[in-house]
Every structure is written in structure tokens, then in C-alpha cells.
């Protein structure tokens, strides 16, 4: 029986073993997945697997088992590959069977040749996904998932030491990383942590950074002539970093969709041969018309240098419900451990809520009503779609935000500390006209060029309208604003496929900050009434954050992620009461209460109940929801009368 | 060639087969060597040059194997009739002789009097179809014979299977067969080259997503959209070498993309003396095309797959990016070449399709319904299920309920939209000079903002396959119709079609109809009645089909619907446009306690229903979609005698109502609407005949819509002239009276050449019993000005 190190360090030798034992049988494939499934189930074994999210590619051993938390950005065409092939030694005529699964390159020994005509050859099919790290993933998610993985210790050591083998384009990225440090102080902490932990024992005992480094740089030398200009890694959001990966999926690829968040376990392949094969092809393409069927751009995109875009051959893949590392990965399972976790947390829910409310009230300059709505917004999620109508979206328009003091900027930073993924969209005439919001298909390179709105489910999108000035939107700008509007109203983005558009449903929490009412549609407008205007906004906001204990902050994070996943129902009794209420309200003043208002009240009631950990609507909550709505509306009316034609 | 054969070759032949120099696709092939040498009676075959078929893969050498005695190489030459049954092509079960014979029988005998294809114009369906095609070839001189695989399948299942599994071997045999028959019959015919058979409509695969390793080297048909095409690539087929010493010449064929340059001259034995002579080598045209999955075939949330196509010779440049095509060809997987320097090989194959036949699906839309794809979409069980469903008495109500279940009530509106989805029957009156009769039903929804109009539109747009959704606010005439774009690369002008053209045969949903600007609206006039779209831009003048139903939503000019005003006044749309809508519905917020109660219950249920239950309803949407597609494709109701009578009565009644009060309440347009609605209702029932109940429902719905939209708020009477002339009859009468009163007033003032505007208004007000607004006064002035009684300049009124 192979030891721990083996399945981590050389999973292919395990596969080889299983393959050799079962060879005439085709069920060796199933046995391989079962083997790894078992291995990963063992106590926290998943934590032993190094993650591409944390460790730069060239510090990882090629052909070792790695994991990657990512979003499917694009799907390439299926590939036919040699599932099983035979090599023959021309001298001795000895024939050996090999498997081609989990590999990019059909290997054979120095004295051997691949017999392409062998009857034993099995052609199989696999699918390639182009995956990027979850867009807008918060620094704390990276940090915590990094810390919970003790196996990285040795590699993280290497991480701290400055790298010499970064390719030029990566160098540029690492500067950005430095800039980013200022924005995320936690990032530095993370590195310190890495350093302090590095004395831990080297468990897989085979990571030799030096050797790997030379290997990687050797690969780099070969590749660099080919990769000018630098390859666009196609991250949806600007300034993103981290590896993009070609993820090769062997089973059930139909079940994955674009924008799904996955955690994959697979064999890392960074074979420099891959790039050589490609460059070779390009040289000879003039001779052989067969090879020029792809344009140069397509070649570049579909087979980029492996050092820049590594390949992962997936053994196990699962869709993630959420990316919050503080929660068990899968909550639906009826495991006692997760149940215990949930019930434990639910028991102390109300103090957490109270604290969070306090925290947000301070963040919103003392406005507790706005803070209440912000909580509701943060736990909202599209839980179903009724024909075209997305249910459960709760876009909040926070109007009346102070314009001058970069209030939104700081508010966003606080939100960033609470939610696992977020993006801050500063609206301005230029950004509207120039940014790429909608992903579009580039037919020359045959890929889906990403746009700002290609986001994973439950990403918080904070739109800052306070900086928007008067000006002229051009065609692109109009399209972008329309796309934002569609996103908010229908929770879908129409990707541009040039000859047609295609609809991709999404689930994005949109928060709009503005001075007056936003030009974008929203489900509910809350007018901010600051109680205090701090003279130094920056100081005020950062002091808020430092005042919160890390453990409390983590509770906030669990709170927001967990409540989103709860089920909810309304009893017949309460339904009756709501009905009565609605009829009564309409009787008094049919103008003021419409079906739309009822929609909103029910939404507020839903999230209000959930925010208190209750999964059914009670009469009290309903009244409280009504009360909140009344308060909110009164504020709007008051605002209207103050400003006259405002609103 | 062994490299390519590995996919289709049964292992038992693997090493025993002895390759023969019998290249099916080479120029030597079609007549076979024997026929060439001996000079058979088929002089036509001999006289006509052979054209290579790179679409079948010129690099492959087909080998024949004697099943009984391996390696009787020389016999191959004499296979034709003598040895017959014993020989098969290596790796297949295809026997050339019998295969040829069977195909000839098929060509000579196949008749299908029921089959109708759009290219069959001029064919006698009771005569052998393909013999007529051959005759056509003789007359026109285009040496290609398209063969529908479906026909072949119904004629000879086994031959069809062989064609699908071993196209590379079988198609050349077909070529041989076709040429023999052809030149037998028309020995003097002069063709550019020998006839090539092009099979199409192979049933193997329809969807790109279903392609898998088993399809390699088989004949497949897939549909998709062309997204990119390459420049023309000249591909060398045969290299011509000449010895520089003794001028000895030799030809070398391309083998797997390579030329084996002769190192020694066979004649004078000089080494390295052979030089390639380019202009005597043979080249064929080749083009690389990328085909992308049709959007309809794609599962939600995934990106489309693409596949590479290689088009050869005259198929080059037959399709343009943006075209929807059905491609028939051979699916290939080629191992990426072994790198001489590295012992390892990339384990991935490159795949492509060698195109044998293209069929544009777009152009087919010019002829009636897209039958082919429609037929394939429904399995027999599905059709059975749909028919079963159609027999239910309450099917109409059921479907109406299934439509947009999240939108509460508004039953009649949903019924109207349902009928719109089904559409009327298409009638062609071109021979009487009337042109096409509109079969599409147009609907306008107007009403208060926030009454889920947009939601209904979104739902419809998501339901129908060829739906488009635009907003009147953002869309320009350009976005709606079509525009001409210059391709930056090729400097070629390209016609880009807008929403209306794209929704041909579908529904175009236009939100915020009222916000549309004047020029855009004017486009709709043509579309909504003539169902065509004329474009004259950048030197391109054309008329495109735009047989789209319009589903529009309009908000009132004032933020709320003013019940005291008519529809026209509320939405401020020209009546010329309004009269083109078959049904105009008002979506108002009803103020009714019972309604509120039901609405509340409905909404509450939305907020806690579980995913599964929603899923169930989603299933209904799929059924609904199929139901509509089936009815649209297969049911074409005609008016029955009774129904015609009922329609006439209904129309006469409608006109009578009005005539009693001195106004017209129905126009021929309304009669047409009624007919369309009745036909649509018959379609809902899957009935081929429009019956009285259909007319009844059409009448009811029409009346219902009129009641809502054409009621004169001043009198409470339904008055169609509000929609047709923009003004109710009473309003018109009142206007006239006022004008006359004004005239009297002015005349009573005696001979004054000019009057003060304000003074006149005050006088008129003092005289009148009813309140007179400034607008009414101005209208009266205008009426008098039209009669040349007076002119108004600034604040003074002059008499003429």
C-alpha cells in the first residue's frame, strides 16, 4: 500500500498501479476516482493538498496532486485524447500499454515509439475549462484558507523569499501585489504568519524549491520568445492576480456551468514539453496546412505556456455552495459535524446580530435603519426563479451618501471584510464608456473575453454613483448601463456572442450608493441620515475595524454566509394575516400600497426572519417588516419635501 | 495511411491486410484501372476528366481484402463483376461491386411521391427522383448529385449504414455508380469533371454537443453557425518533379501532408537532381471554417462548442460568417504530429470535419416552415403526449394558466398572448395581387407602470425560440431594422440585421413602446402590415422578411393612467399605428378587495415556495414551448363553412352597432383580426378546421380588448373610431358643433376684418353652456381655418 506521500506527490504512479492491475478491464478509471475519494475523506486530508490559490506554480511539484478553488470563466471545445495507448520498442518489439488519462503528453521511454495503429488504443473524450480564481475574492478568505492548511508551511517559506523565476509579465503583477498590500493590511499579516509557521515539519518531504526553481526557469527560457505580447489571462475584474488554469475534466462535465465556483483536486501538469510542441507546430505550419486551422491567437489562448497557465487534470471536482473557509464546505450533508456547527452557531445568533448591527450602524455614521437594511441586503440571495422573475434579490440603493469624504470607499472596505467576494464599481462617465462590462466572444481567439459582470454567485457588487458627473455616454456606455440595469432587475447578463446574445443567469448582491435616487433600478431605496459626520473619515472607519476583535469579525462572516443558505417558509396562518393586512391597507389608501409594495414587504419580512435565525415568518416579524418599510418610506417622503423636486 | 485508419479498422485485419495501391480517391479511381485500359463502352466516362475529392481525404489509400485468401493483390483490378462478393475494402464490410449495384438500383428506382422539399420545384414526384436529377445535371452541367440520406435509408437500410460508417470508401463507389448511369444515358454530355455524389441529411448526429469519439471517420450532419472562415489555401495534391539533368519527369502524390521528394532520378540515376515544378503541380482549393453550435442547441449556462470544418474546391467561400448551416461531412481526428526531437507525443487529437455538403438553413426560411428541424425535435411519444393534451376540453384555459404563472390574473391578456404565440394561418394571395396576408397577431399592452408588463414581455421573449426583446427607449430605427457595416478587415459591406428581422417567424417584444422616436415607429408601419422591411442604405437596396408578431408595452404619458382620457390620449401614439394592433389591452391596477386578497396570497406563496415545486412548473414551460412549436409547425387550420358564416355575422353585427348611432365601429382590419384570432384558437385545439367555437372566442376576446381600450370615457360606449381615427365619434361631433358655434359667433359680430384671440375665447365661453378649454377653442379655430373661413396670426384672428 502506498504511503501518504505517494498519493500526494506522485498520484500518477498510483494511477499506474491501479491501471496495471486492472488493465484489460475498463473499470480502472472508476477505481482511481474511488481511491482518491477515500484518501481525501481521511481526517482533514484535503488540507494536506497544496493549493494553487496560495502557492505559486513554480513551487509546486509537477505531476503532484494539487487543489484549486476557482470559477469557470470559459469552456473550450471537448478534446479527444489517447485514453490508452501502446508503445513498442523497435529493437525488441516489446509492447507496453500506457494510460493517457490525467496527462497532456503521451509519454514513452527513450527507446520506444508510440504505435498509433495499435488496436489497443482507446480514444476518449475530456473537456477543458478555463478557470480563474474567484473574482473579487476577499483577502481574508485567502488568508484563512491558507492558514487552515498546515501542509503549506514548507512551501510558504519559499513564498516569502523573493522569486527569481517569475516571468516578466508576472513581475508586473507582483508590483500590483505590493500596491495591494497597502489596501489590505491583512495581506502582510498573512506573510508573517507564513514565516512564523515555517518551522513546522515538512510532511511531503519532497518539495525542493531550488530544483523546482531551476526547472521552472528553464521552461521559462524556452517559452519567453513566444509570449510577446503578454498573454491576457482574462480575469473578469481588473487588477486580479493569481493563476489561471486549464482544468481538464474527465467526468460529468455537463453538470458544470460557466461562472460556477469549483474546488478541484487533480494532477498538476506544467510540462514544458507542452509549449515546445506548440512552438514546433507553429514553425512548421507553413509546410503543413493541417496545422494552420487555428489562428495564432487561438493557439496562444488555447495552449498558453504551462508556466503561466498550468493544467490541472481533475480527479475530483465539486461545486462549492460558498467560498467562506470558516464554514464547512458542504452544508446540505447530514453529517453530525456540520449539524453541530450550525446549531452551535444558531444558539448564539442574536448577540452576533446585535453586534453586527452596531458595527454597521457605526459604519453608516450612526444610522441604524440603514444598517438594518444593509444586513438584510447582505444575506439576500436569489433562491428561486419563477419563470423570468428572480426571487430573493434585494438591491438596496443607499441614497444621501456624503459625496466628498470618500465615504463609499471606506464603506466598501468594511463590506470587503465581511463578505467572501466583492467588487467596488466606481461609476464615472469614463469608466462607463471604457470598461468592458459584458463578456463577449472573441471569435479570432475563440474564447469568451471576460467582463466586469462575469461574477460568481453571491458576489457583492458595490456601485458608487456619488462620483458620477454629467456627461455624454457613448454606445458602449449605454450598453454598459443597460447591462447593469438588467443585472439588477432580472439577475441575468446577456453575454455578447456577436451574432446573437446569450443569457446567463446570475446571483449578485448589488448595493448602490448615490446622492439622490440612483439612475439604476433598485428594489429598495434607503435614504441615509447620518447622525455624526466624522472630521476624518479614514481614521473613523479604520478605527471601527480595529475595534472589532478578529474572533467577532469571523462570527460576522459566518453569520452572513450561513443565513443565506437557510430555508424559509410561511405558515397558512400568517399567510391569512398578511392577506388581511394587505386588503386593509389597500382599503384605506389604494394609491399608496401596490402589489409592488407587498413584494417589498414580503422580501423584507423574509430576510428579517432569516436574519434572526427564524425559518418561518411570525406575525411579529411581519409587523416589524411593515414598520421598517414605513420608516423607510417616511424618510423618503421627508427627503422629497425637503428637496422639492429631488427623487 | 495506417495512422488514420486506426479508428475504423476492426482489429482482426490489423496485420494481415496487405496494402494495395488502390487509391479510391485518386484520379485513377472512378473508372478503376481496368475500365481505363480496356476502353469499355462507357466512352463518356473516359472522356470526362476526374476531379479529386479532397473532401474524402486524399491521403488515404483504400485497400481491398479478400476474405478467403489474404493478399490476392492483383485480383482487385478484376473485382468488378467476376469475383464480386468475396472482396471487401480493408477494414470495412463494403463490397465495391454490390455496393455500386445497390446504389444504382437506388438511383434508378427511388420514388417518394409524398416527400416534398423546397428544392423540388419542377420534379415529377412520381418518377424516379434521382434520374430526374441526373437529367438536370445533363442540362445544367453542374456535376454534383445531392442525395438525401433519408431517402437512401428508406430504400436500403444496409447501404445507408455502410454509407454512414464508411463514407470514405462508399462515396467513391457511389460516384462510380452515378457516373456509369449518367454516361450510359447521356454519352455525349460534356461536364467539367465527373459527377460527384454529395450525401446530406445523415441522421447520425444533429447536435455538435453529441459528437464523441465513436463518430470519428463517419458521415455526420450537424447544424451550427459559421463564425469564421479562412482565406483560400492552395493545397498541393500532386507534385511535379523534373530531373535537371535528363529532363525526366515524375509525379508524386501528397501523403499525409508531405511530399516524398525523389532523391534519385529513375532515368539517369543522378542523385538530387529532381526539382519541383510549381506550375505543373496540382493544387486544390481549401478553406478552414469554424462552426459554432446554434444557440438553440445549447444547454443553459454553458458556452457554445465549436468545430473546425475543411471545405474543398467549389465548396470554398460557399458560406459566410453568420450563416446558419447544416453541414454533412466526415468527422476526422488526426494525431498531432510526432515531434522528431522529442519522444513524447501530445496525447490530444485534432478534430475537424471534411465538408461534403452544405445546406443553409437561413435561406430555407424563405419557404414556409423549417420542417426538417421541426420534425426532429419531437419524438413520437412527445407528439402523442401533445396530441393527448390537445384533446382536453379545457386546453385553452390550461395553456393560458401555464403562461407566466408568476403574473397574477390578467387572464384575457394571457389568452390574447397565447393566441399570438400560436398565430393565424399563413395565406398567400400573391397571385391575386394582394400579397401575403398577415398571419401574425400584434398586441399592445398599455397601463400603469409597475403592472408587470415588462415581466410578461420578458416571459414571452424567453419562451419563444426566435424572440427578441428591445426597449423603445434605447432602440433606434437602426437597432430595430438592419444596418450596413463595413468589415474593417475585408472592407466588405455586411448587412447586420436588427431585432425585427431576427425575430422573423417569432415575436418581437418592444418595451416602452411610447418612448420610441418617430423615425423608428415609422419602420413599424411597414412591418406590422406588410411583414417586410425595406432597406436602402449605402447602395444596398433590399426587402427583408420580417414576419414578426409584435408584442409591445406602453406606459401612459402621465405617470398614471388617466381614466378620463381615451387610450390615444393616454399613450399618445398615432392611431395609424394603433390600428395595426389586433388586440390592445389595458393593464390597470384593479381596486377590488377580493382581488387584493387573492393577489396577496399569490405573492406570499412566491416567497417561501421550495425549489422543487418551482421546478415542476418549469417543466410546464417546456411542454408549453413544445406544444406551441408543434402547433405552429403542423397545424394549419382553414375556415369552415359555419365559421365563415359566423365571422360574417360577427362583422356585420359590429358594423350595425355603430351605424345606429351614426358611427362606424368596425373596419375590414377588424375582420382580419377576427379571422386570425379564430385560426389561432383552432390551432390551440390542434384542429385543421376553424369552427364556430373558435369564432366565438375570437369575438369575445376582441370585444374584451375593445371594451378596455376603445371605450369613450365621455360616453362609456365602445367606439372603434378612437383607435382608427384617433378620436371618438362623439368627440368629433362635439368638435364640429363648437366650430359651427364659433362661426356663428363671428358672423354675428358683423363685418370686422380681425378679432382679438382672447376676446373671442371669452365671448365663446360666455355663450356656451359647457366648459370650453383653450385646446377645444384652438381646435375649432383650426377647423375653421381649414374651411378657409379665417386665419390665425399670433394673437389676432383675421377673417377671409
Image (tube, coloured by chain):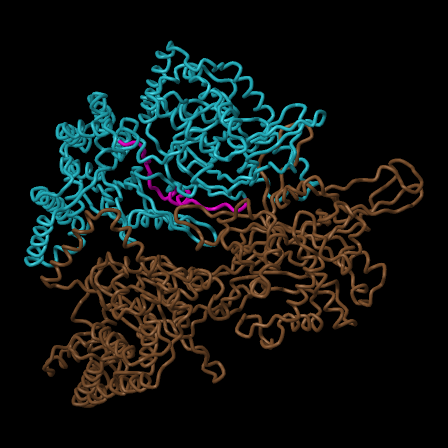
**Side (left or right) of A301 relative to B514:** right
Task: Provide residue A16's location: percent of width, then percent of height.
Answer: 52, 26
Asked if residue B718 is positioned above or below residue A180 in the image, the reply reads below
**B668 or A92: nearer the viewer:** A92
Is A518 placed left or right of B234 in the picture? Answer: left
Q: Which one is in front, A116 or A187?
A: A116
Q: Chain B, which colour? A: brown
Chain A appears in which tint? cyan
Q: Quadrant of the N terminus of chain B?
A: top right
Residue A423 is inside the magenta segment = yes
Tally of numbered discs: 0
Q: Position of residue B566 (x, y in %)?
A: 21, 73
- Residue B90 x %, y %: 69, 48
The quarter in which the C terminus of chain B is drawn is: bottom left
Q: Residue furthest front?
A: B68
In the image, B783 versus A165, the foreground residue is A165
Residue at left 33%, top 23%? A143
Which residue is at a point 53% across and 68% down the rendered structure image? B541
Residue A103 vertical position relative to residue A58 in the rendered view, above or below:
below
Q: Give the residue displayed 15% in from the left and 58% down from the top.
A: B599
Residue A120 placement: quadrant: top right
* x, y percent for residue A455: 36, 39
Q: Which corner quadrant of the image does residue A322 belong to?
A: top left
Q: Decide whether residue A362 is among the magenta residues.
A: no
Residue B776 visible in the displayed image = yes
Query: In front: A517, or B546?
Result: B546
Q: Which residues are magenta?
A: A419-444
- Asked whether, in this view, residue B66 is left or right of residue A636, the answer is right
Amino acid at each position: 500500500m502506498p504511503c501518504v506521500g505517494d498519493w500526494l506527490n506522485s498520484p500518477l504512479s498510483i494511477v499506474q498501479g491501479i491501471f496495471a492491475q486492472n488493465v484489460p478491464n475498463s473499470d480502472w478509471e472508476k477505481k482511481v476516482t474511488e481511491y482518491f475519494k477515500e484518501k481525501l475523506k481521511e481526517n482533514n486530508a484535503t488540507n494536506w493538498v497544496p493549493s494553487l490559490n496560495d502557492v505559486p506554480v513554480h513551487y509546486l511539484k509537477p505531476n503532484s496532486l494539487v487543489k484549486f478553488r476557482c470559477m469557470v470563466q470559459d469552456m473550450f471545445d471537448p478534446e479527444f485524447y489517447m485514453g490508452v495507448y501502446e508503445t513498442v520498442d523497435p529493437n525488441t518489439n516489446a509492447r507496453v500499454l500506457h494510460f493517457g488519462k490525467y496527462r497532456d503528453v503521451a509519454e514513452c521511454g527513450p527507446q520506444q515509439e508510440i504505435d498509433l495503429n495499435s488496436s489497443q488504443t482507446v480514444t476518449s473524450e475530456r473537456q477543458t475549462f478555463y478557470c480563474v480564481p474567484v473574482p473579487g475574492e476577499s483577502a481574508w478568505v485567502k488568508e484563512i484558507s491558507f492558514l487552515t492548511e498546515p501542509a503549506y508551511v514548507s512551501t510558504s517559506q519559499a513564498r516569502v523569499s523573493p522569486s527569481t523565476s517569475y516571468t516578466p509579465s508576472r513581475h508586473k503583477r507582483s508590483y500590483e501585489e505590493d500596491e495591494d498590500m497597502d489596501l489590505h493590511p491583512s495581506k502582510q499579516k498573512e506573510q508573517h504568519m507564513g514565516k512564523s509557521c515555517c518551522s513546522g515539519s515538512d510532511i511531503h518531504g519532497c518539495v525542493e524549491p531550488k530544483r523546482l526553481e531551476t526547472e521552472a526557469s528553464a521552461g521559462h527560457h524556452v517559452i519567453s520568445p513566444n509570449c510577446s505580447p503578454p498573454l491576457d489571462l482574462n480575469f473578469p475584474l481588473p487588477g486580479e492576480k493569481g493563476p489561471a488554469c486549464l482544468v481538464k475534466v474527465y467526468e460529468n462535465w455537463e453538470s458544470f456551468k460557466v461562472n460556477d465556483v469549483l474546488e478541484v483536486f487533480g494532477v498538476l501538469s506544467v510540462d514544458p514539453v507542452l509549449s515546445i510542441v506548440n512552438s514546433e507546430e507553429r514553425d512548421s505550419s507553413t509546410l503543413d496546412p493541417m496545422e494552420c486551422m487555428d489562428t495564432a491567437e487561438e493557439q496562444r489562448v488555447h495552449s498558453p505556456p504551462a508556466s503561466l497557465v498550468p493544467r490541472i487534470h481533475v480527479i475530483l471536482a465539486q461545486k462549492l455552495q460558498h467560498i467562506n473557509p470558516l464554514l464547512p464546505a458542504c452544508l446540505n450533508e447530514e453529517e453530525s459535524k456540520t449539524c453541530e456547527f450550525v446549531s452551535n452557531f444558531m444558539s448564539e445568533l442574536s448577540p452576533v446580530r446585535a453586534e453586527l448591527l452596531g458595527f454597521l450602524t457605526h459604519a453608516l455614521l450612526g444610522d441604524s435603519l440603514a444598517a438594518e437594511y444593509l444586513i438584510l441586503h447582505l444575506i439576500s440571495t436569489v433562491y428561486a426563479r419563477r419563470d423570468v422573475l428572480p426571487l430573493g434579490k434585494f438591491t438596496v440603493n443607499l441614497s444621501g451618501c456624503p459625496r466628498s469624504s470618500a465615504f463609499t470607499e471606506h464603506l466598501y472596505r468594511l463590506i470587503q471584510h465581511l463578505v467572501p467576494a466583492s467588487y467596488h464599481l466606481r461609476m464615472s462617465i469614463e469608466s462607463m464608456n471604457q470598461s468592458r462590462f459584458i463578456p463577449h466572444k472573441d471569435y479570432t481567439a475563440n474564447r469568451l473575453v471576460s467582463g466586469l459582470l462575469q461574477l460568481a454567485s453571491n458576489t457583492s457588487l458595490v456601485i458608487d454613483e456619488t462620483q458620477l458627473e454629467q456627461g455624454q455616454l457613448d454606445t458602449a456606455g449605454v450598453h454598459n448601463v443597460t447591462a447593469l440595469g438588467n443585472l439588477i432587475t432580472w439577475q441575468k447578463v446577456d453575454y455578447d456572442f456577436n451574432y446573437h446574445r446569450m443569457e446567463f443567469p446570475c446571483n449578485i448582491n448589488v448595493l448602490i450608493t448615490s446622492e439622490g435616487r440612483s439612475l439604476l433600478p433598485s428594489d429598495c431605496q434607503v435614504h441615509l441620515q447620518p447622525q455624526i459626520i466624522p472630521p476624518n473619515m479614514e481614521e473613523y472607519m479604520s478605527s471601527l475595524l480595529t475595534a472589532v476583535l478578529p474572533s467577532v469579525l469571523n462570527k460576522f462572516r459566518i453569520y452572513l454566509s450561513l443565513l443565506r443558505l437557510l430555508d424559509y417558509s410561511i405558515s397558512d396562518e400568517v399567510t391569512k394575516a398578511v392577506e388581511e393586512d394587505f386588503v386593509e391597507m389597500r382599503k384605506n389608501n389604494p394609491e399608496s400600497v401596490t402589489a409592488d409594495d407587498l413584494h417589498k414587504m414580503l422580501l423584507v419580512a423574509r430576510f428579517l426572519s432569516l436574519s434572526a435565525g427564524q425559518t418561518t415568518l411570525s406575525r411579529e416579524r411581519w409587523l416589524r417588516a411593515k414598520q421598517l418599510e414605513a420608516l423607510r418610506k417616511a424618510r423618503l417622503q421627508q427627503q422629497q419635501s425637503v428637496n422639492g423636486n429631488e427623487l | 495511411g495506417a495512422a488514420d485508419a486506426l479508428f475504423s479498422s476492426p482489429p482482426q485485419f490489423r496485420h494481415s491486410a496487405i496494402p494495395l495501391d488502390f487509391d479510391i480517391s485518386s484520379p485513377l479511381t472512378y473508372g478503376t484501372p481496368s475500365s481505363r485500359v480496356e476502353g469499355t463502352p462507357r466512352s463518356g466516362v473516359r472522356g470526362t476528366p476526374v476531379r479529386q475529392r479532397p473532401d474524402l481525404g486524399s491521403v488515404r489509400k483504400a485497400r481491398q481484402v479478400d476474405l478467403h485468401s489474404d493478399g490476392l493483390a492483383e485480383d482487385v483490378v478484376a473485382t468488378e463483376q467476376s469475383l464480386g462478393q468475396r472482396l471487401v475494402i480493408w477494414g470495412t464490410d463494403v463490397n465495391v461491386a454490390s455496393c455500386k449495384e445497390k446504389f444504382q438500383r437506388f438511383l434508378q428506382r427511388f420514388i417518394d411521391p409524398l416527400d416534398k422539399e423546397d428544392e423540388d420545384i419542377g420534379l415529377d414526384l412520381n418518377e424516379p427522383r434521382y434520374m430526374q436529377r441526373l437529367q438536370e445535371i445533363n442540362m445544367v452541367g453542374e456535376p454534383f448529385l445531392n442525395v438525401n440520406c433519408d431517402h437512401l435509408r428508406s430504400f436500403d437500410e444496409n447501404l445507408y449504414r455502410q454509407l454512414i460508417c464508411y463514407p470514405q470508401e462508399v462515396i467513391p463507389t457511389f460516384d462510380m455508380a452515378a457516373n456509369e448511369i449518367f454516361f450510359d444515358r447521356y454519352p455525349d454530355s460534356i461536364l467539367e469533371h465527373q459527377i460527384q455524389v454529395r450525401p446530406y441529411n445523415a441522421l447520425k448526429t444533429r447536435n455538435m454537443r453529441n459528437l464523441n469519439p465513436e463518430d470519428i471517420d463517419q458521415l455526420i450532419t450537424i447544424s451550427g453557425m459559421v463564425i469564421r472562415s479562412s482565406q483560400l489555401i492552395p493545397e498541393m495534391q500532386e507534385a511535379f518533379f523534373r530531373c535537371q539533368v535528363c529532363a525526366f519527369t515524375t509525379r508524386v502524390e501528397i501523403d499525409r501532408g508531405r511530399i516524398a521528394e525523389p532523391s534519385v532520378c529513375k532515368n539517369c540515376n543522378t542523385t538530387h537532381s529532381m526539382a519541383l515544378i510549381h506550375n505543373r503541380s496540382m493544387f486544390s482549393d481549401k478553406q478552414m471554417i469554424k462552426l459554432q453550435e446554434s444557440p438553440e442547441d445549447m444547454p443553459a449556462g454553458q458556452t457554445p462548442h465549436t468545430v473546425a470544418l475543411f471545405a474543398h474546391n467549389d465548396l470554398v467561400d460557399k458560406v459566410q460568417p453568420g450563416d446558419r448551416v447544416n453541414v454533412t461531412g466526415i468527422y476526422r481526428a488526426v494525431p498531432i504530429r510526432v515531434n522528431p526531437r522529442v519522444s513524447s507525443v501530445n496525447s490530444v487529437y485534432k478534430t475537424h470535419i471534411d465538408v461534403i455538403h452544405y445546406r443553409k438553413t437561413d435561406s430555407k426560411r424563405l419557404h414556409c416552415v423549417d420542417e426538417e428541424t421541426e420534425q426532429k425535435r419531437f419524438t413520437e411519444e412527445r407528439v402523442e403526449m401533445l396530441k393527448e393534451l390537445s384533446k382536453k376540453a379545457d386546453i385553452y384555459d390550461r395553456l393560458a394558466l401555464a403562461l407566466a404563472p408568476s403574473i397574477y390574473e390578467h387572464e384575457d391578456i394571457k389568452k390574447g398572448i397565447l393566441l399570438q404565440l400560436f398565430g393565424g394561418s399563413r395565406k398567400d394571395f400573391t397571385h391575386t395581387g394582394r400579397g401575403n396576408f398577415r398571419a401574425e397577431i400584434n398586441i399592445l399592452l398599455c397601463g400603469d407602470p409597475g403592472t408587470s408588463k415588462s415581466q410578461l414581455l420578458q416571459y414571452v421573449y424567453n419562451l419563444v425560440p426566435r424572440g427578441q426583446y428591445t426597449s423603445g427607449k434605447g432602440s433606434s430605427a437602426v437597432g430595430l431594422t438592419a444596418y450596413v457595416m463595413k468589415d474593417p478587415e475585408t472592407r466588405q459591406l455586411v448587412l447586420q440585421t436588427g431585432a425585427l428581422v431576427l425575430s422573423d417567424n417569432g415575436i418581437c417584444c418592444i418595451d416602452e413602446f411610447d418612448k420610441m422616436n418617430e423615425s423608428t415607429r415609422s419602420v413599424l408601419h411597414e412591418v406590422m402590415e406588410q411583414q417586410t422591411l425595406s432597406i436602402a442604405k449605402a447602395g444596398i437596396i433590399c426587402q427583408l422578411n420580417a414576419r414578426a408578431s409584435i408584442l409591445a408595452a406602453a406606459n401612459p404619458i402621465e405617470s398614471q393612467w388617466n381614466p378620463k382620457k381615451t387610450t390615444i390620449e393616454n399613450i399618445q401614439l398615432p392611431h395609424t399605428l394603433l390600428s395595426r394592433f389586433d388586440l390592445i389591452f389595458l393593464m390597470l391596477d384593479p381596486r377590488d378587495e377580493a382581488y387584493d386578497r387573492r393577489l396577496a396570497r399569490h405573492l406570499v406563496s412566491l416567497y417561501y415556495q421550495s425549489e422543487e415545486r418551482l421546478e415542476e412548473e418549469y417543466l410546464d414551460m417546456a411542454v408549453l414551448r413544445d406544444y406551441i412549436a408543434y402547433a405552429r409547425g403542423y397545424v394549419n387550420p382553414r375556415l369552415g363553412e359555419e365559421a365563415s358564416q359566423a365571422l360574417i355575422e360577427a362583422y356585420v353585427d359590429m358594423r350595425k352597432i355603430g351605424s345606429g348611432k351614426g358611427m362606424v365601429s368596425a373596419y375590414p382590419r377588424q375582420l382580419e383580426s377576427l379571422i386570425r384570432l379564430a385560426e389561432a384558437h383552432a390551432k390551440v385545439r390542434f384542429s385543421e378546421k376553424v369552427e364556430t367555437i373558435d369564432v366565438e372566442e375570437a369575438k369575445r376576446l376582441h370585444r374584451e380588448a375593445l371594451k378596455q381600450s376603445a371605450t369613450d370615457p365621455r360616453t362609456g360606449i365602445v367606439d372603434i373610431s378612437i383607435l382608427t381615427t384617433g378620436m371618438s365619434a362623439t368627440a368629433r361631433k362635439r368638435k364640429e358643433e363648437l366650430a359651427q358655434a364659433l362661426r356663428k359667433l363671428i358672423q354675428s359680430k358683423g363685418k370686422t376684418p380681425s378679432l382679438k384671440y382672447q376676446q373671442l375665447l371669452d365671448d365663446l365661453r360666455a355663450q356656451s353652456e359647457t366648459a370650453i378649454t383653450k385646446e377645444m377653442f384652438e381646435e375649432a379655430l383650426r377647423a375653421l381655418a381649414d374651411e378657409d373661413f379665417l386665419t390665425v396670426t399670433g394673437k389676432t384672428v383675421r377673417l377671409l
